[in-house]
């Protein structure tokens, strides 16, 4: 199952699964009905070549997504400023291409950390903030202060 | 104690001398009496028969002079003995006193040396303890100063980095900040890609 970059959190995945369950429920009542889906769900269908949403394809996709949710890995990214949805997609895309295709990311903002990001995995924290960069180069900072 | 013994000894010697002198004088008088009686007897016999009064007087004078000379010799001899004995006693007393004095002086010097050694040991021990205490205090102080220095430097670096990063963040506008940082952030992520992969594997 290929996930679109716009679906980067488990909450979003849960929403998509709920949408599919609703659609399946409507189809049971009325097999002629053509269910409507959100943009994220439509993108998911497009990436996985789902052209007609039937009862059987719906059930297959739902099971696959539940499997993804069950076995997924999640990281948290803290940014120094409020980020746009596009920016978040860009970062999630990098993680899915370079680290794990089924990785989920949650985002938060912490203005006290200055620029950069902090990545928290279940085991470790990676501090890519400007503040940490400055601290890592404290010797240079002291040299600059002496010179000035 | 030693002086009292000495005085008692001198006293005993003096008494013995006096007694000896008295005995000698007494014997001389007895001898003189005996001799006088004989002479008297002889003179009596002779005076009545042989010697005139003048000669008798001369003989008596001569006898008295001899006796006086004998007394004089005896007293001179006693005087010499007494002087010699006194000198001997004085010498002996001096020797004993000197020996005793030397012994006491040696004891005093030994005690003084011992006391001096004890005082020196106490002074050395005190000095050593003082130096050890001073050294410990110096090390503690140095450690405290170093610790405080490091704490202040770390604190300064934290504050400075916060100031710099806040300044950088405030120099841009919200979302624009993260967009302009994207390339840099992706570069940092690429540098730690393998590490993150292993972490999530």
Image: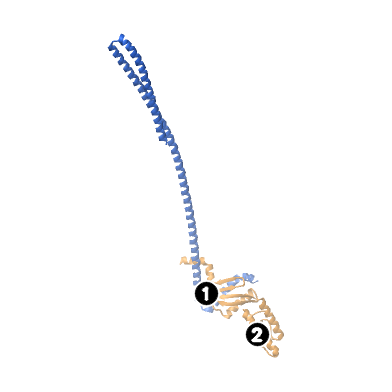
Q: Residue A100 got which mark?
A: none
Quadrant location of the C terminus of chain B? Answer: bottom right
Regarding residue B166, the answer to whether it shows in the image is: yes
Q: Residue shown at 33%/18% (left/top)?
A: B67
Q: In the rendered picture, chain A carries what hue?
A: orange
Report the front residue among B14 and B57: B57
Q: Position of residue A64 (x, y in %)?
A: 69, 80
Q: Which mark is residue A19?
A: 2
**Residue topped by disc 1:** A112
Q: Chain of mark 1?
A: A
Q: Quadrant of residue B50?
A: top left
Count of numbered circles on the image: 2
Q: Residue at x 48, y 55 (%)?
A: B133
* Residue at the extreme right of the image, as rendered: A56
**Is residue B87 in sight in this rendering?**
no
Left-right relation of A24 to B151: right
Colour in which chain B is drawn: blue
Query: Secondary structure beneath disc 2?
Result: helix
Residue at screen point 34% across, 12% down: B42
**In-front residue for pair A131/B25:** B25
Q: Name the side, left or right, on which B62 lies relative to A45.
A: left
Image coordinates for residue B14, horizontal then vertical, percent:
38, 28
Helix, strand or loop at mark 1 = helix
Q: Quick one: which residue is furthest to the top in this view?
A: B49
């Amino acid at each position: 199952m290929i996930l679109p970059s716009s679906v980067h959190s488990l909450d979003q995945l849960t929403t998509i699964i709920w949408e599919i369950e609703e659609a399946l429920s409507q189809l049971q009542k009325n097999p002629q009905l053509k269910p409507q889906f959100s943009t994220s769900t439509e993108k998911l269908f497009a990436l996985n070549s789902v052209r007609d949403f039937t009862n059987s394809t719906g059930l297959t996709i739902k099971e696959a997504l539940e499997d993804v949710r069950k076995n997924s890995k999640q990281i948290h990214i803290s940014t120094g400023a409020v980020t746009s949805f596009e920016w978040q997609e860009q970062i999630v895309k990098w993680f899915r291409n370079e680290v794990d295709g089924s990785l989920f990311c949650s985002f938060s903002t912490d203005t006290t950390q200055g620029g950069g990001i902090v990545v928290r995995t279940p085991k470790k924290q990676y501090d890519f903030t400007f503040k940490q960069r400055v601290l890592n180069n404290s010797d240079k900072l002291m040299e600059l202060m002496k010179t000035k | 104690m030693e002086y009292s013994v000495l005085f008692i000894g001198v006293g005993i010697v003096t008494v013995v001398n006096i007694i000896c002198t008295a005995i000698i004088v007494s014997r001389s008088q007895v001898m003189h009496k005996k001799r006088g009686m004989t002479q008297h007897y002889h003179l009596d016999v002779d005076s009545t028969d042989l010697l005139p009064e003048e000669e008798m007087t001369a003989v008596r004078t001569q006898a008295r002079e001899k006796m006086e000379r004998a007394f004089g010799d005896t007293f001179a001899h006693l005087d010499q003995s007494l002087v010699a004995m006194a000198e001997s006693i004085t010498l002996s007393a001096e020797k004993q006193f000197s020996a005793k004095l030397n012994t006491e002086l040696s004891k005093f010097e030994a005690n003084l040396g011992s006391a001096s050694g004890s005082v020196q040991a106490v002074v050395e021990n005190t000095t050593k303890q003082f130096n050890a205490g001073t050294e410990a205090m110096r090390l503690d102080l140095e450690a405290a100063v170093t610790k405080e220095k490091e704490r202040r430097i770390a604190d300064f670096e934290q504050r400075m980095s916060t100031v710099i990063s806040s300044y950088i963040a405030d120099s841009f506008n919200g979302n624009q900040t993260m967009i302009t940082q994207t390339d840099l952030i992706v570069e940092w992520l690429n540098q730690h890609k393998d590490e993150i992969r292993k972490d999530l594997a």
